[in-house]
Each structure stands twice: as C-alpha cells, then as structure tokens.
Amino acid sequence: MDYGHFRAHRHCGWRGATISAVQLSTKKCVAIGLSGGVDSAVSAHLLLEKGYDVVGVFLRTWSQRDPNCPQTEDEKDARSVAGKLGIPLHSFDLTGEYREDVFTHFLAELEAGRTPNPDILCNTKVKFGAALKLLPKLNCSHFATGHYAALVHENRLFSLQKPADKNKDQTYFLHELNQDQLAKAMFPLAKMTKPEVRKIATKQGFSVAEKKDSVGICMVGDRDFPQFIADYISPKPGELHEWGTEIMLGNHIGTHFYTLGQRRGHGIGGVKNRPEAPWFVVAKDEEARVVYLSQDESMLNKSSVVVKAMHWSAGVPPAASFTATAKVRYRTQDAPCTVTVSGPKTTVQFNTPERAPTPGQSLVLYSGNTLLGGGVISQTY
C-alpha cells in the first residue's frame, strides 16, 4: 500500500458536515492511540491511506509490574503494528494521571456503594485529557482513537453521533468530552463495521487481526473482581436480607461487591419456603450494610431517575424540557423518555420502566443518532 497516495472516502450521509479527509488535509500530523488492538491498528492504516502524517502513541495507565494487566503484551502488539505501518511509536507513562483522576474516584464510588464506570473517566481525563497535552510535543494537531463513533461539525459546534456499526457504538463512553476535546479528536472507524475492520487487518497482515477485544477493566485481568478490590478496600461485613420480609438470607463482606440486578455471587443456596428461582439484588442500605435480595425481578424496574453532574455536549441542554432517548448502561436499548432540567438537577422520566438503572452508572441521552450529553445516576424511582 502506498500511504503517500490520498484517497477520499465516500460521504455516508451523516447529518451536518462530517470531518472528512479533505477538510483536515492541511493538518499534517495526527497522533493515533495504538492500544495493541485491531481497531486502533486499522484506524492508523486508514489515516495513512487518507494522506496524513501519523504518529503512534501507546499510553501506559497501570503498573507494568502487575502480571494481571497485559499492558506489556499490548505494547508489543502496538509496536508490531507501528513497524508494519512504518510509523514511529512513542510510549508515555500516564499511570500517575490514571491513578489520581480515574482509579481514586473509582474506589471512592465503590466505597460509597455506587457502581462507577472507570472507562468514561479514562476517556475524559486520560485519553482525551492528559494525552491531548502531548500533541505539541509530537508536532500533531489531532488525536485519533479506534473508538466506534462519528464526529460532526455543524453551526460551530462539534457533536458525537452513533457510528455505522450500531452494535459497536461507543459514544456512551465518550459522552463527557467537551468542545475543546472534540475539536482535536478523530474517529477513523465512524463508517466501518467490525467485520470490515478485521478484514482490512487481515489484508494488511497485522498480527492483531484476530486478537480478541478487551473486556472489563485492565487492572483486574483474570482475577475475580472481589479479589482485586479486597487489595484496596477493607472488608465491611453485613447481611443479606429478603426485600419486604427482612428475613436474613446470609452474610456478605461488603456492599461494594454488589450492584443492582446482580443474580450471581450471593453465596446463598436454597431458601426454605421459597421457590428454586434466581435471587436478584434489588436495593442496598449502605449505612446498615444490608443488601436486599428478591426473587421478583420486576422490583428492578424504575420509571424515572435523577442525574447529577450532567454534561451537555453543546454546553447547554436543548431546552428546559424535551423528549429524547436514553441509555442507562452500555449496550442497553435506547429508551424513549422525557427530560426535565431544573438548575443542576436533571430528571429523566421513561415512557416504559427501565430495568435496574443503577446509582453511579452513567445515563446518556440521544436525539436520534446525535449524543446530547450524559451524567451520573444519583437516584431512582
């Protein structure tokens, strides 16, 4: 492949002006976050194909001495891809930034009994926070990643839209990016599907063409989550009760090991006078250290939630009251809803009750394919 040859890609009809190769052709250098996976590898290939000068960046966010986090292997894979593409690869140690801005918050939220999502903060604070500050050092104007998301520039505002591959849509994890961050971002996979990405990777001879997608949290690795957390949060024993009867079902070593909707890991067997059916976590009392379980799954359904720390992509909400769709966690179906904004408080009323919206998790709002913003669920009703 001759990467000096410019090839314009077909416009696929996103609303507004997509960030195309033509528009950014004067911005000579793009830094690409090479994670050691197939998505970032193909993203780098696509940027080169469009005529950019491309610089690879590998971001280390966890100790290399931890054998459970495969960052050393990931860096080797990133170097293999960079070598295949003929681009430089710079490795940066951002473990301090990750610990301070992401991991400390993650532990604090768990201790408070909430269920945080560290990937969202990692994108905001590290990949599009600390990493963007590296651009002047690299002589680059933009930072690209292998996220499946589309970036649109319209009426002097940047917005995220769902990508062509809706099954891989990762806009949920990017909802906290601000206008300055979006202005320097690039997402080369906006119009690609995962099968197309793997096909390109195979054709280019990338060693990561069939590498499995990473799931979960890097630093946990192959360990049990409770085993990992026990190294950082002291046990806080309590009891498991049946919701509505207060019957004690068992004991636990910390409410932070439980999340709403959880049906495994309770450690209780058959319960006298109760059917052989799953038990679901339906509520937690942090002060009393009680986790409530029920065999009635409908107890998890909630009709509305209050969202705190709402971040609006455009800087302000569309209106004081408006209709939208919401995701209460990654990979859930978009739920039609009515949104009411009153000062710092945002209330989301679902047209149909949603299963287990969970305090600490993020709720993200959309208008069609366009991401409007998101925030952290604080209360459910």
Image (cartoon, rainbow, N blue to C red):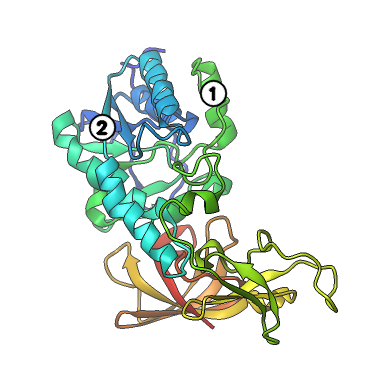
Residue 151's disc is: none
Residue most extreme to the bottom: 245
SS state under label 2: strand
SS state under label 1: loop
User: What is the quadrant of the N terminus in the image?
Assistant: top left
**Residue 318 in the image: above or below residue 108:** below
Answer left or right for 30 relative to 225.
left
**Residue 159 in the image: above or below residue 165:** below
Question: Residue 29: percent from the left, percent from the top?
Answer: 22, 29
In front: label 1 or label 2: 2
Amino acid under disc 1: Ala
Image quadrant where residue 23 sits: top left
Residue 92's disc is: 2
- Cα gap from disc 1 to disc 2, whole angstroms: 24 Å
**Residue toward you, 151 or 144:** 144
The residue indicated by pointer 1 is: 209
**Residue toward you, 224 or 363:** 224
Question: Residue 220: percent from the left, percent from the top?
Answer: 48, 44
- The residue at 30%/23% (across/down) is 51
Question: Residue 283: percent from the left, percent from the top?
Answer: 58, 76
Answer left or right for 79 relative to 38.
left
User: What is the quadrant of the C terminus in the image?
Assistant: bottom right
Amino acid under disc 2: Phe
**Residue toward you, 361 or 128:** 361
- The residue at 85%/73% (across/down) is 275
- The residue at 27%/39% (across/down) is 94
| Mark 1 crowdedness (10 Å alpha carbons): few <14, some 14-19, many ≥20 | many
**Residue 200 in the image: above or below residue 221:** above
